């Protein structure tokens, strides 16, 4: 089977045919892009296998805990190649995102040995790491006998990679020299602007370049059952982390001050109050009516259904809404967004779906085999070009012509948005154990401000006082 | 029977209609939604005119959803099976344990009987989260984590007290004279229990069983915390249609419809016992 | 008669003394529940600790400090207030509505029986899924209820997303799910009332309204108490509906006990505070269920007295 195809692919792997020639050649042989991708990956993994003993854990079995997500779909689609290459068995549990992290916390806090590796966000490792539930992966990454020579750890985007590393000290800088690598970036989201190009054109509104323009543009676009700007608003940390914190950080603002290892609230400065005021006005005037219950999926679906004109949220939401059976598929466009007109560039806060290794895993070396494959360059390229494994975390994937072409063709502005924002893209929060307490309270305060239950200035002072009190109680302030 | 004026009859009919509309409309709407695609569901203004499609149910039943974006795997039927299995098994175990105990409490006043009964009932009212988290830890240690047995045990928290109390009330209402007569005729205790007491308490047992079934079916958190993905009930399964690449409203609706269907069938089947059996054993005329 | 069934010579194989029988019968049920006591005491132990999963090094016994802190913690008082308000409102409204519906369906007829089963459907919808349904129906974009409101000229109603209507919205969903429960218990009560007093009253020419106040209601009171307390115990522990609809927001409008404890455990991983909150909730439910059971027992005693 597939003999001709195999020859062609092997020629590619040997470097005799370039990538485009390969896909064209395969197309001529009647292969669909995604089948070609799987085959190509099979060949690439065969090539890989030559330099490293991938079969060291043959016959072993590992189990993963996964979130229902396109990244998971992409991994599962390619999983057979891994199993074939290593002779390992991989099983997995997939849980809906609404309950996913509760499941992870339940499994880890009870010391469950069921799962060897699992998906997580970087913020969660600020709990899991100190709690002693996950491993510092540096031990494996830096061991050539355990990590294949093509893994190319330095290929990971700098900001993303360091955002997953923390020394465990409250307020400790992410990615510092003594940091532990709690998780491996897998796919990530920048928070930027996605907009309905048709609506903006029709209303004669230019793509906003800063927060004031955004407030004005959103107001202009509101009407006829459409609202101007979609941002999250539910009572959760997730309301603070996307567009809101990205814009906030663009003004040089921080969540917490760190002085001699002591933390204190930093959100009641004048600049912060000004930014909060604009944000709150924007939501009141041109946000969703049910903003206060909006999580990522309502923000996304409303854009996809043509209920909102713009979103300042995860870029991949805009990406997904431009495809599939969404009403607005093909009408969306993307732009980098720097809230501060004086900023040198955008500073998106990021969400990183990453892979972490459970401390309770019974075979960590075997689990690491899976992790390095799943976060390796071959699977990254396969997922990015054949499936919806965006945004990739590897520079090599972003440099890939086919991937850029694919994005440019159907997702106008996406590549430039990413390239422009990547230098400033990282986690802008202060890593500390009370992350979820403080951000949930921040979101609740924001809700009160929008509902006019408390004036912005007063609300921020109250929030700062409460944050300081909680930090003191926890021995951090 | 008493005379009812035409005015009263009309008023009653109107009131009843309003009640039925309030309680049934959401179900009807979700039912209609389950035959639509996202495209017609998201229409503004909403409309009842649409071309019905079975794709949602098809996707749930075959476990494969083909969208233009990707092919998604759905384990909803597995979730449905788990719900049925967990609820049926839990209610069965609760009956096996609870009915004899209820009989004991009803027929024999023994030392501490009220205390024991109270302890049992108070479990029903303890916040589930309170015991659940330490329980997860212990289950891990004794190997009950991620087993159906462990789950069925925890489900007893919901089912057992309910059965015990309703059935106990029912037994107390049955005059012990019949049982005495039967025993004096020379039958064993067990035969009396089986041939006389149980059939007489039938409606109470059926109603208690149905209520316990409903509460077990509606539970959300136990399996989530204590078991892996292949043992999750429909309450967790229905959330799987919300993913980063979009929300499948039609499938959520179909999932809800499918999750109500088994309990409804059971309720219709047990209908004649339901009202009679639920008098909670209080004052009999 | 065979030998085996002769009185006094019952089969000896499973001979259990009369005194032991009730213990034997109730023991298995009790044993199953005893297992639950161990995690319960573990939770009590947690509640007396300073215990955050994210700061394992700081874990220590702090005895009653978690509880003492509640006194000066405005968010705790808010939680208590919201929980009681929520429980009070839902139970009263569901009682009134449930009683009204039960009265409508009192007469035994095919239609009434059928309707009463149909009305149980909301109860069969898991609260978590019911919340999801209502979220779909109240969506300001395509939700049918929002659309109905715009038809009557209200186009700025925000359901769960506004602090002024969030409580109303979750209570509405709670009413939708649980009124049928109230209704079926009261209906069972109504139908089991003796006929004689009503016949006598009708002969004396007592008007129907009077009959309701003077006969039906007093006789139904035990049922009403039972159903109310039962519902109260559940309502004060509400989680599924509120969490699914608003996650406790907007602001701190709906941070009831279980929502707060859930967030404290699963998000903040503050086990000590979470357990202390749940212990207080447990104390409240224990207190209510005590009244509930006493009432139940008294009701039974009286029933036996009348029989």
Image (cartoon, coloured by chain):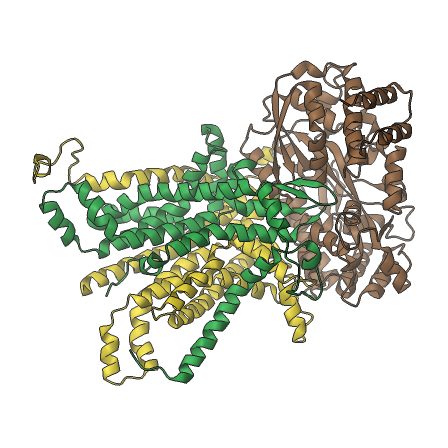
Q: Is residue C19 left or right of residue B238?
A: left
**Above or below, comparing residue C18 to residue B23 in the picture:** above
Q: Is residue B258 left or right of residue A440?
A: left
Chain colored green:
B
Q: Residue at x 48, y 70 (%)?
A: B19
**Above or below, comparing residue C49 to residue C238 in the picture:** above
**Residue A206 vs residue B184, the one in the foreground:** B184
**Residue A152 percent coordinates (x, y):** 81, 24
Q: Quadrant of the C terminus of chain A?
A: top right
Q: Is residue A387 left or right of residue C18?
A: right
**Residue C73 percent coordinates (x, y):** 57, 54
Q: Colour of chain A?
A: brown
Q: Determine the image quadrant of residue B111.
A: top left
Q: Is there any visible trace of residue C218 in the rendered image?
A: yes
Q: Determine the image quadrant of residue A418.
A: top right
**Residue C45 percent coordinates (x, y):** 46, 39
Q: Is residue B278 left or right of residue A430?
A: left
Q: Quadrant of the N terminus of chain A?
A: top right
Q: Is there any visible trace of residue C239 in the rendered image?
A: no
**Residue C283 percent coordinates (x, y):** 42, 52
Marker count (numbered): 0
Q: Colour of chain C?
A: yellow
Q: Residue at x 29, y 70 (%)?
A: C219
Q: Residue at x 76, y 44 (%)?
A: A257
**Residue B210 vs residue A158, the one in the foreground:** B210
**Above or below, comparing residue B22 to residue A264 in the picture:** below
């Amino acid at each position: 089977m597939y003999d001709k195809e195999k020859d062609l692919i092997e020629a590619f792997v040997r470097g005799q045919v370039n990538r485009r020639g390969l896909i064209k050649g395969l197309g001529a042989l009647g292969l669909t892009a995604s089948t070609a991708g799987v085959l190509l990956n099979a060949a690439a993994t065969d090539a890989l296998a030559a330099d490293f003993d991938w079969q060291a854990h043959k016959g072993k079995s590992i189990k993963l805990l996964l979130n229902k997500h396109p990244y998971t779909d992409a991994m599962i689609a390619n999983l057979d190649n891994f199993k074939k290459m290593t002779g390992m068995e991989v099983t997995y549990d997939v849980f809906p995102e609404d309950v996913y992290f509760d499941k992870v916390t339940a499994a880890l806090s009870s010391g469950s040995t069921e799962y060897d590796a699992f998906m997580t966000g970087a913020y969660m490792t600020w709990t899991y790491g100190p709690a002693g539930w996950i491993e510092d992966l540096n031990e494996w990454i830096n061991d050539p006998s355990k990590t294949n020579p093509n893994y190319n750890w330095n290929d990971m985007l700098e900001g993303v990679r360091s955002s997953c590393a923390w020394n465990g000290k409250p307020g400790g800088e992410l990615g510092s020299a003594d940091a532990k690598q709690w998780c491996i970036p897998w796919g990530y989201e920048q928070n930027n602007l996605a907009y309905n190009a048709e609506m903006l054109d029709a209303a004669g509104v230019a793509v906003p370049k800063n927060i004031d323009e955004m407030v004005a543009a959103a107001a202009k676009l509101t009407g006829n059952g459409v609202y101007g700007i979609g941002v999250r608003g539910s009572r959760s940390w997730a309301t603070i982390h996307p567009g809101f914190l990205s814009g906030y950080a663009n003004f040089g603002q921080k969540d917490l001050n760190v002085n001699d290892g002591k933390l204190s609230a930093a959100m009641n400065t004048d600049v912060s109050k000004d930014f909060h005021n604009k944000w709150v006005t924007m939501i009141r005037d041109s946000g969703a009516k049910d903003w206060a219950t909006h999580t990522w999926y309502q923000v996304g679906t409303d854009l996809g259904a043509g209920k909102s004109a713009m979103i300042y949220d995860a870029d991949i939401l805009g990406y997904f809404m431009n495809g599939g059976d969404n009403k607005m598929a093909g009408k969306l466009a993307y732009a980098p967004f720097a809230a501060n007109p004086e900023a040198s560039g955008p500073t998106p806060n990021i969400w990183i779906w990453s892979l972490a290794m459970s401390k309770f895993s019974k075979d960590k070396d075997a689990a690491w085999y899976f992790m390095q494959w799943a976060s390796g360059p071959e699977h990254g390229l396969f997922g990015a070009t054949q499936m919806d494994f965006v945004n990739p975390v590897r520079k090599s994937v972003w440099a890939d012509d086919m991937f850029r072409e694919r994005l440019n063709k159907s997702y106008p502005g996406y590549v430039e948005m990413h390239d422009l924002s990547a230098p400033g893209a990282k986690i802008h929060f202060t890593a500390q154990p009370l992350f979820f307490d403080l951000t949930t309270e921040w979101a609740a305060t924001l809700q009160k401000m929008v509902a006019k239950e408390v004036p912005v200035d007063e609300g921020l002072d109250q929030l700062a006082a409460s944050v300081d009190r909680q930090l003191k109680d926890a021995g951090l302030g | 029977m008493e005379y009812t004026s035409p005015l009263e009859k009309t008023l009653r009919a109107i009131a009843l209609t309003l009640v039925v509309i309030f309680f049934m409309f959401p179900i009807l709407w979700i039912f209609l939604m389950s035959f639509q695609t996202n495209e017609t569901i998201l229409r503004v203004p909403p409309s009842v005119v649409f071309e019905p499609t079975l794709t949602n149910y098809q996707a749930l039943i075959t476990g494969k959803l083909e969208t233009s974006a990707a092919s998604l795997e759905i384990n909803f039927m597995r979730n449905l099976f788990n719900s049925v299995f967990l609820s049926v098994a839990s209610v069965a175990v609760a009956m096996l344990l609870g009915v004899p105990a209820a009989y004991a409490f009803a027929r024999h006043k023994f030392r501490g009987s009220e205390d024991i009964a109270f302890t049992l009932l108070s479990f029903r009212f303890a916040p589930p989260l309170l015991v659940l988290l330490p329980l997860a830890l212990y289950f891990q240690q004794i190997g009950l984590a991620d087993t159906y047995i462990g789950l069925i045990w925890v489900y007893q928290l919901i089912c057992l007290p309910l059965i015990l109390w309703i059935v106990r009330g029912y037994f107390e209402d049955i005059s012990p004279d019949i049982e005495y007569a039967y025993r004096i005729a020379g039958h064993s205790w067990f035969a009396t229990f089986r041939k006389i007491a149980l059939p007489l308490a039938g409606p109470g047992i059926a109603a208690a069983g149905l209520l316990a079934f409903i509460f077990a079916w509606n539970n959300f958190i136990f399996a989530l915390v204590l078991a892996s993905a292949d043992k999750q009930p429909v309450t967790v399964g229905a959330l799987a249609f919300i993913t980063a690449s979009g929300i499948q409203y039609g499938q959520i609706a179909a999932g809800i419809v499918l999750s109500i269907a088994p309990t409804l069938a059971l309720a219709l089947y047990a209908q004649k016992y339901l009202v009679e059996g639920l008098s909670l054993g209080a004052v009999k005329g | 008669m065979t030998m085996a069934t002769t009185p006094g010579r019952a089969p000896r194989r499973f001979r259990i003394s009369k005194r032991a029988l009730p213990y034997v019968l109730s023991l298995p049920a009790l044993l199953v529940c005893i297992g639950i006591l161990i995690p319960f005491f573990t939770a009590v132990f947690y509640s007396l600790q300073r215990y955050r999963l994210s700061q394992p090094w700081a874990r220590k016994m702090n005895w009653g400090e978690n509880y003492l802190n509640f006194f000066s913690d405005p968010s705790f008082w808010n939680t208590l207030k919201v929980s009681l308000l929520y429980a009070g409102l839902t139970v009263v409204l569901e009682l009134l509505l449930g009683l009204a519906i039960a009265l409508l369906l009192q007469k035994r007829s095919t239609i009434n029986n059928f309707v009463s089963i149909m009305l149980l459907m909301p109860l069969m919808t898991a609260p978590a899924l019911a919340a999801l349904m209502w979220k779909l129906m109240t969506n300001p974009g395509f939700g049918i209820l929002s659309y109905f409101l715009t038809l009557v000229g209200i186009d700025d109603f925000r359901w769960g997303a506004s602090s002024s209507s969030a409580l109303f919205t979750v209570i509405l969903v709670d009413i939708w799910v649980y009124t049928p429960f109230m209704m079926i218990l009261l209906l069972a009560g109504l139908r089991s009332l003796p006929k004689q007093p009503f016949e006598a009253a009708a002969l004396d020419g007592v008007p129907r309204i009077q009959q309701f106040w003077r006969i039906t209601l007093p006789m139904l009171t035990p049922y009403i108490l039972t159903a109310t307390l039962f519902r109260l115990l559940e309502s004060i522990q509400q989680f599924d509906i509120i969490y699914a609809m608003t996650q406790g927001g907007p602001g701190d409008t709906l941070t009831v006990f279980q929502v707060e404890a859930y967030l404290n455990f699963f998000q903040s991983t503050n086990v000590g505070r979470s357990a202390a909150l749940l212990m207080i909730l447990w104390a409240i439910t224990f207190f209510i269920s005590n009244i509930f059971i006493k009432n139940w027992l008294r009701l039974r005693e009286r029933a036996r007295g009348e029989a």
